[in-house]
Image (spheres, helix red, strand yellow):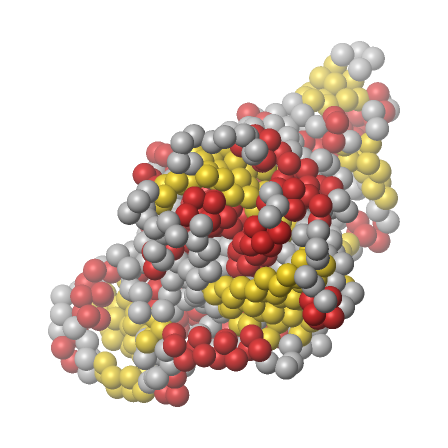
Amino acid sequence: MKKERVNISRREFLINTTTVGAGFTLGLYLPLSSSVARAAEQTTSAPTEVNAWVVIEPDDTVIIRIARSEMGQGTLTGLAQLVAEELECDWSRVKTEYPTPGQSLARDRIWGSFATGGSQGIRGSHQYVRKGAAVAREMLIEAAAESWGVPKGECSVSASVITHKPTGRTTTYGKVAAAAAEMIPPFEVELKDPKDWKIIGKPVKRLDTVDKLNGKQVFGTDLQLPGMLNAAIKACPVFGGKLATFDAAKARKMPGVRAVVSVEDNAVAVVADTWWQAKTALDALPVTWNKGPNAKLSSASIAKMLDEGLTAKKAFVGNKAGEAKKALKGAVKMVEATYAYPYQNHATMEPMNATALWSKDRCEVWCPTQNGEAALDATAKAAGLPASKCEVYKIHLGGGFGRRGAFHDFVTQAVAIAKQMPGTPIKLLWTREEDMQHGHYHPITKARMVGGLDDKGDLVGLHMRISGQSILAAVNPKWMQNGVDMFTFQGLLPDGDHAISYTVPNLLVEHAMRNPPVPPGFWRGVNINQNAVYMESFMDELAHAAGKDPLEFRRKLMTKHPKSLAVLNAVAEKAGWGKPAAKGVHRGLAVCKAFASHVAACAEVSVDDSGTLKIHRIVAATDPGHAVNPQQIEAQVEGSFVFGLSALLYGECTIKGGSVEQQNFHNYPSMLISEMPKVDVIVMPSGGFWGGIGEPTIAVAAPAVLNAIFAATGKRIREFPLKNADLRSA
């Protein structure tokens, strides 16, 4: 059997190694933490930690530790599959648990990165979790061989049963786990060749489904602790504004109210026996705000700022080939268009929340978070304590989409309130209105597209100017490169995980950075969402101007991008491109590369005489390299389309008086079940790389639908959401 050989030095095992592409330290010699007894001290009923990822109970139940967060995307099951594959354990006896970031810190960050975003849950940790499982497997086999007094090479393992092949003698993981924990980890392990995978690549059932169905799964809003009180909070609705005054007298007299407190310098909170009591008192609380310098900020003033950036002399360059401006001047036909993409809120079904317990010596927080380590850092800073005296207990998320990744303002607030009531657990829960007005929003941008065609209708030059916000400039300037936010160019770069899917002989892609005082953030898919709309819609415009079929026009530009071309061809074939659709139904295409995966979509829509849109079907193809769980991939694609199409149809945060105007789902809706199209998913892993799943496909749904709308109506929609557009035929 061909195997992937991984050589690991003794120093790497005894100290640490670097996780793939992340820069975090990862210990592979795994001393037991203080909370886990050594094997000699264990009773026969106690579980045994073989290493950081594998804990085995005497009845052969395998507990797999998962550092990444589960927020509905299936990472928990996918990572467990990776570990179980190399461990050769019985999948029917697998359970999972979260280690805490405090435990990881105490053990030299032994589990690597806790961050779950950028579609990194599996692709960013597959190597070291498989390696950790392979190490545990070899230790278990060695323990069995030693107990029998036979060479390790004579033993094999399958489904948690170790067999001595010459004699047929068997034992189980549960019986040798304690002895295995005492073994010195091997210095060389072999990872399976993908052709030999038994669990990876199979649509096994998710491990968290049953508890969600029977109500056992606890989310942050469900959490109950002895003696716990509840808090509701209201922060200044104007960006950058501060708390001026509040009169607590009336609120303090209301039922259940325990305290009325200021939080930092921009918010006030009420603490009560129940959350509804806290909210009711907060609503009755007289508050005045110092609105600050942004009190006159509006969507119109922001649009004016972005318009200036479209024609500004200076801009950052993200991709350049040939001489685009010169080629455009010599083109036979010029095509120009300007697109605009609005602010979007994450609008997770579960609003922001955290529960904090503070004392002068220790602070503990229970919260749904996409990054346990970042939550721990926020806890320590707010608590005024070293991280070693703090702990965060991660809970399943009722939606994340990037909001609960880099931003832990809700944790900071919960700790700030708890500090004013030492020894009492305080559960802070935002209202939906608070969640809408205090997000970190998908950045607002505009794009001016200019393309040039020759006398044969071929694309000879393309100039793309993006004007808008930089997420990194606001969130983490250290990640920028000489002042350039390369994240802005997702899906447009010359190479890498977010490379453009076309070869254009003369290309210039620029970013005029314009940063209004509305906080931007990572929003599922991030910049690939608007970039795919801009590029794929304009590709259709160019094809139409050239008098060419949109598929054939793209194909000619994609000969050097075979994997992207393959997914495009797959959706075209499955949808029946080039063949007549049902009466009144029209098709549109889109393709892109994002988060290392190649994705494409073909949408089928109709628009009636009144301008009512019906999206009948979307055929979607994705090549993620390796597909750990095809069923989960299908679910992710379908879910991403709900998210992406909701944004296209309805998603828009407008600014008036320095505040977000949208308050709840009545004016920031999601698409309805009746509006959801049929989705045909083609999972076509080509192997050799690990691409993302949760975010890439979100980008192709919107432009595919927009291109189909043009085919149906003759109208190009270039500003969003569609609820503001007249879709009646031109």
Q: Is residue 485 or residue 446 the one in the foreground?
A: 446
Toward which corner of the image does residue 642 lie, by quadrant?
top left
Question: Is 122 left, or right, of 412 in this rendering?
Answer: right
Q: Could you tell me which residue is drawn at 36 percent across and 73 percent down?
A: 655
Question: Is 490 left, or right, of 225 in this rendering?
Answer: right
Toward which corner of the image does residue 142 lie, by quadrant?
top right
- State the image coordinates of residue 31 (x, y, percent, origin top left): 70, 49
Camera sees residue 166: yes
Q: Could you tell me which residue is drawn at 74 percent across and 41 percent down?
A: 562
Reply above or below: 402 against 238: above
- State the image coordinates of residue 588 (x, y, percent, origin top left): 51, 43
Reply above or below: 266 against 201: below
Q: Quadrant of the N terminus?
A: top right
Q: Could you tell me which residue is drawn at 44 percent across and 75 percent down?
A: 303
Camera sees residue 683: no
Q: Could you tell me which residue is drawn at 59 percent across and 80 percent down?
A: 312
- State the image coordinates of residue 21 (x, y, percent, origin top left): 73, 56
- State the image coordinates of residue 338 (x, y, percent, origin top left): 52, 66
Q: Is residue 120 or residue 357 the one in the foreground?
A: 120
Toward which corner of the image does residue 133 lie, by quadrant?
top right
